[in-house]
Image (spheres, helix red, strand yellow):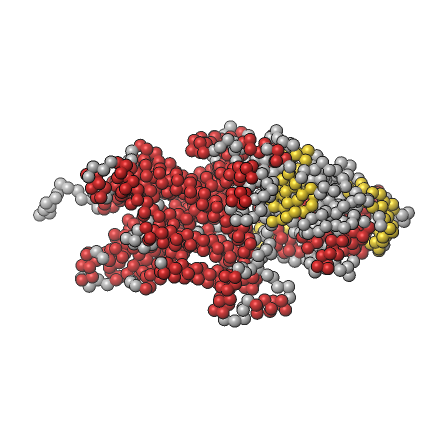
Amino acid sequence: MIRYTTLFVLTLLVLAALSFSLAYLFPGDVLVNLTGITPQNDIQRSALIQQYRLDQPYIVQFAFYLQQLVTGNWGYSFISGLPLRNEVAIALPATIELSAYAMLIAVIVGVPLGCYAGLRSYSTADYAINTGSILSYSFPVFWLALVFILVFSLELGVAPLSGRVSLLFDVPHRTGFVLLDILLADGINRKLAFTDALHHLLLPTLSIALISTAAMIRLTRRSVIDVLNRPYITAARSRGLSKWQIFFRHILRNALLPILPLMAMQITTLITNAMIVETLFSWPGIGNWLIQAIYQRDYPALRIGMLAVSSVVITLTITIDLINRLIDPSREKFERATV
Amino acid sequence: MKSTGWVANTCKGLATIALLSALPACTEHRQDPFYQTGLVYCSESNPVNFNPQLDTSGTTADATAHQIYGRLLDFNPDSGRIMPSLASSWMISEDGLTYTFQLRRDVQFHATDYFTPSRNFNAEDVIFSINRWRVPEHPYHQVSGGRYPYFESLGLADNIADVKQLNKYRVQISLNNRDSSFLSNLATDFSVILSAEYAAQMMVAGTPERVDYFPVGTGPFKFESYRKDHFIRYQRHDEFWGNLNTADRLIFDITPKSSLRLAKLITSECDAIAFPAQTELDIIRNRPNLELAEKPGLNIGFWAFNTQRPPFDNPDVRRALAFAIDKNTLLEAVYFDGATRAKTLLPAASWAYQSDADDTAYNPVLARNLLDDAGVEEGFTMTIWAMPVERAYNPNAAKMAELIQRYLANVGIRANIVTYDWTTFRRHLREGLHDSVLIGWSADNGDPDNFYRPLLSCDAIPSGTNRAMWCNEDYDRLLNQALATDDIVKRRAIYQQLNRLLYERLPIVPIAHAYRYQAYRTELQGMTINPYGGVRFGGVSKTL
Amino acid sequence: MPQFSLYEEEFQPSPWQQTWREFRTSHAAFIGLFILGLFVCFALFAPLVAPYDPIAQNIDALMIPPSWNMNGTISHLFGTDSLGRDLFSRIVYGCRVTLGSSLLLVLVALMTGVTIGTIAGMLRGVRSSIVNHLLDALMAIPTLLIAIIIVAILGTGLVNSMWAITLALTPQFIHHTRSFVRNEMKKEYILASKLDGANHWQLFFHSILPNMIEMLVVQGTLALSIAVIDISALGFLNLGAQPPLPELGAILADGLDVAYLAPWNVALPGLAIFLIVLSINVVGDGLRSALRKRLSR
């Protein structure tokens, strides 16, 4: 536990240091990159330099930077002039929401299908599932999303193609998760808004989920097949346990455990895909925000965005590793494998 | 459409099987009456602020001029004549130097979260609005940058001698010199009326710049909220003095990509869109539930040379480059026949249009010879700046730049294409960092002066509308002569002289006058297309 | 004197031949290899295959539909784009750019990864653990984010996006090499070589590397499919290859503007990326199951 906490804190420190060094690495003025404020004159400039300790050694600057991060003063967007903390607070939950639903679908659909394929390995059903998964695993996500838009939005007209909810609904920002916000909102037709939001969620979630589901299927299938070949399964069979008993008592648990750390790896891919899909569906998430920021060379935003996204991913990864260790202490730490 | 068919069919089979089971029946959900209470307009970009006095970009004007604000005068969208607006009538003195305006009574300003008006619109507001850009010592003049590009480029501030209040509802403006385009200028998108009371309150509160970011006006909609790159929300101004048959809400959905705007129009996520791409017009025409309104636009797309940078300070070099490109091809490839070839600055819709004006013709051999004579060697490298946004006058500057790049390669000139985001792009242009730029101009009123003066007069260099950075005394003298007379025949003759001068000096190569299009869903009622400047949603409603 | 062999009748295939045999039994994998080979040929011989210059504009042939369409012509097999460029030629050259740069960057990542991984695997203790944690941190940062940062520092361009993806892929190679080397170091044949007096260098080249190659090939195919997707994604987002360089993702993004009028400009480059990735995945899958079967024999 302590080990994990140290690891976590250290990693965050490394990330913070990285984001601090970005202010120096990015082109342009360090002061502007760090604060997002363009000084109007020399007096203001030297005041800012003093305030941000930029006249002192790097280590002092970094310490001050950390303090600023912790107190929530993250600087301002170079382009919009708004505090970055607010911008991130709006954008990040949108991405997490999208990824969470996609992950949920991937687990709900992928794990059972993968188990089924694994149990019936080398049968026709397995072959079909395997083919389907390798096909959908090979889709470039941006193209898949475009095909979805073309077919479902433009040809069939079943789902809208941009945003989280029709702009006609003025949903106030509370939690940042649109479905929750709608439930908490006053003065709008909640049922109507909720259906509307679900429709907006449909296509982006599916585009990401399809690829993640394929990965889930392949992971689960492989794992189940590996477990099936273990001697304890043969032993269980020879003891005369029924198929279901073997499946639930021995296979499922032992097959799912090794998948957990692999899921952590999937999160990175998932977030990348979510970020790309966001730009196509005008989803107001962190990916869209970061890509706009890079187009407009909004360096303060990039600095904070990078820190925010990687912190979230690291937190998730480490949490999953931790859970994994708690459930199954026998496993080697940080085990990795491939899809 | 046939061409989409085959992709769709291929994908449909694959995807429908996999997913159709997961889809709820949802085509009907947009039938709820709630969806007709608001209009969604997909606009192309972010406004710079919410005061069109401070910015000439069409985006800012669209988001503010006719939505939030009112003007003393307006253009009749059908005839283009000037009609009363906040001024119910006006009088011009014999010598053409004194204008007296009778103001409309009972016009209320917006009551919003941040301002509650205690009085109606009156002469004070008119004087405040004009003096803000006119008088450099005015307490508000320096607020939000202190640049008023439209008025600066016309030199209007210098020509107004005084603005006087005769009584509460009567204002008198006196000019130094006759200006036959003066009334037109007061009717443009930029001559909006601000609230003097709100400005005074903000000045006391120490936040004067809020006036330009949290606007208060007399227009049909009041500002509610704005999120950069996402949306602008407006609410109906219930006390609006004019047409009240307007939707409850107006939302600008900021969507920079034109293909995405069209897609949203088709899925009815937008009710109207800005700047449909020329390539997509047929799609709009072929869809029964979409409407495409078109009018010959008062605009010009051109290629401007930075005449302050050698070798572009040499008219022969500019002439050579003009001869190196084939305008007809550009028209076909970029405008898809949605434009007419431009010979001069003025489109055919203007009364001063000259049909027999001189024009450059495609002649690469001549171009090369001219370049040789001017000492520009093969392999010379220059930049073409392509604006990053779509405008009616140039729907795809990047593509045009690529085409020009190839034409220039044929005459031995290497061209690099440069682009930035719109705000940075215009800042760098103003600083004169470009060799040449593909950009254009949409007129704010039908007066020819509105083309010639802002685009190429000396005053327009600092105000950032003279992209050629070209200053010519003869040109400016002729321009002023044209304004000094009301005689149309005389004015036309002067503009023909100007055309000849421009053909000789070629600071810019006129390329096209594009049609103006507006695409909207048939559910909208009351949409009109306005040849002068921006869209207007006052009086527009929606029935499903 | 003829060589006497006790097992004369039995042919002993090398491990590679065994793998190849197993691989061939899977039709899918074989077809995948064939398609991949085709794309590699495109990449290698693009100038010979492509009928037109991929960036030559032709104003007289704007947006011609593909040849199988009623309005298409056979002279433009896949039709043309909004600037009249031949789409087939662009895709062929696109394979060269996309697949070629992916192969290159995977090789770079592989070599860096193996070097660092081996060092980390042969070392023990604190240093190894630090490397491990740093890698974990690096692996957790999404590729797109690394790419965005690199683009912000160095500017857009194909080479910069290649650096970004290399940086994102290297940790996986390090990880695998490291754990592989660790496991091998515990084995007896290494001990035997050590007793023979082999130094680290010799150990690696003569004992570990030959055994590692299969693992590297499998990891390499995986990385390659990721690299192709990432390169084209960055091109698509306009953060990687810049027009007019024909990169499949960038071609697709170009086609997006005319997605309605000329949907083949979106469909075909996308299909090409999909097929490349699919064939790589199928081949990788086939290789892995062939290996697995061989080892289980």
Q: Residue at x 65, y 41 (%)?
A: B250
Q: Above or below — where is A250 with respect to B526?
A: below
Q: Residue B380 location in percent, x, y?
A: 59, 54
So how many labels did they put on this image? 0
Q: Above or below — where is C181 with respect to A95?
A: below
Q: Residue B487 location in percent, x, y?
A: 86, 44
Q: Residue at x 48, y 46 (%)?
A: A97
Q: Residue at x 68, y 35 (%)?
A: B541
Q: Residue at x 15, y 41 (%)?
A: C10
Picture quadrant where residue B41 is located: top right
Q: Residue B97 location in percent, x, y?
A: 87, 50
> In which quadrant is the C terminus of chain A drawn?
top left
Q: Is residue A70 left or right of residue B494?
A: left
Report the front residue among B539 and B395.
B539
Q: Is residue C133 left or right of residue C147?
A: left
Q: Residue at the far right: name it.
A: B94
Q: Residue C150 location in percent, x, y?
A: 47, 56
Work out whether residue C33 can be spotted: no
> In which quadrant is the N terminus of chain A drawn?
bottom left
